[in-house]
Amino acid sequence: MLTSNFNLWDLTNMVRSPQFQEANKNRYHGHALTNPKLDFHGFADVSEIDAILNAPTTNNIELKPHSKTFDMVSSVSGSIVNIDAYLNGEPEDMYTFVNSESNTVENLNLYISLSWNVPASDIAAAAQRIKAYVESRPSNVSLNINIRTDYRTLHYVGKTQSLKNRRVGKELYSMLIDVASADDYLTDQVINLIGHPMFYRYIILQYICGTLDSNCNVEPCPPDYINFLTFNKTW
């Protein structure tokens, strides 16, 4: 497997750069880098990208971090007697206090499995579910967000793009994207980017197709990732 690791903005800025667009304009569907289609990429003009990224987002301010800083647990020593445990002869017959973190970290690992014939409306709906999930996170929750996609080159032989004419390459590629770290502030631009089909069709797919000079055949979702299209998590 050939693996490429990207920071979210390194990948995004690369695809948007004049150098990448010039180098790939004559490669597979490279014309879409300057002329995206609304019904495929989710937006119709590259001049819209900054407005999409800078749109206001919402944050959950109603759920506050809990105030408890200690948990009481059973122990062989402590400051409070556990009467039931003592009468039963259990060794852990005392209660002691241990630190309890008020803030928690959640991992959001998404897997992208999008062929060319997936409607942009389905991608937009899935992206909006993810955006809503991130925006509605409890205020004491920080997110590690990672995106992965595994794929192979896909070529057609003959005059028609039919199943019998399809040839899938043997080499397996994997793209890993570090979207956000729980240690960093989650910006509006990050939320807007992963909440819009532009990111999945214009950034990720155009990079893959330009790099391979080919369409791609996406592999099934690994068990430790969440399929992007069927994402339905809520808090």
Image (tube, rainbow, N blue to C red):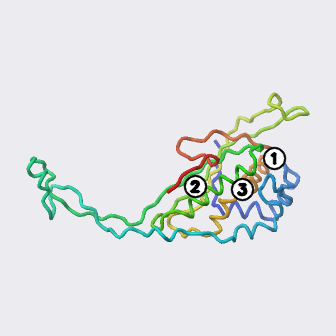
Marks 2 and 1 sit apart, C-alpha to C-alpha, by 26 Å
Write the residue at 75% across / 40% down.
153
Write the residue at 65% across / 72% down.
56
Q: The residue under label 1 is which amino acid type? A: Asp
* Residue at the outermost front position: 62
Labelled pair 1, 3 in contact (Cβ < 8 Å): no
1 vs 3, front mark: 3
Write the residue at 62% across / 64% down.
191
- On the image, which quarter does residue 127 sit in? bottom right
Q: The residue under label 3 is which amino acid type? A: Pro
| Circle 3 residue | 197
- On the image, which quarter does residue 7 sit in? bottom right
Q: Nearer the viewer, residue 26 or 224?
A: 224
Q: Secondary structure at mark 3?
A: helix
Q: Residues within 10 Å of mark 2 (few under 14, many from 20)?
A: some
| Circle 2 residue | 146
N-terminal of the pair, mark 2 or mark 1, is 2
Left or right, 206 with respect to 72, comes to right
| Circle 1 residue | 213
Compared to residue 21, the image places residue 110 above or below, namely above
Compared to residue 28, the image places residue 106 above or below, namely below
Marks 1 and 3 sit apart, C-alpha to C-alpha, by 22 Å
N-terminal of the pair, mark 3 or mark 2, is 2
Q: How many marks?
A: 3
3 vs 2, front mark: 3
Left or right, 189 with respect to 155, comes to left
Q: Nearer the viewer, residue 90 or 10?
A: 90
Q: Nearer the viewer, residue 90 or 157?
A: 90
Q: Residues within 10 Å of mark 1 (few under 14, many from 20)?
A: some
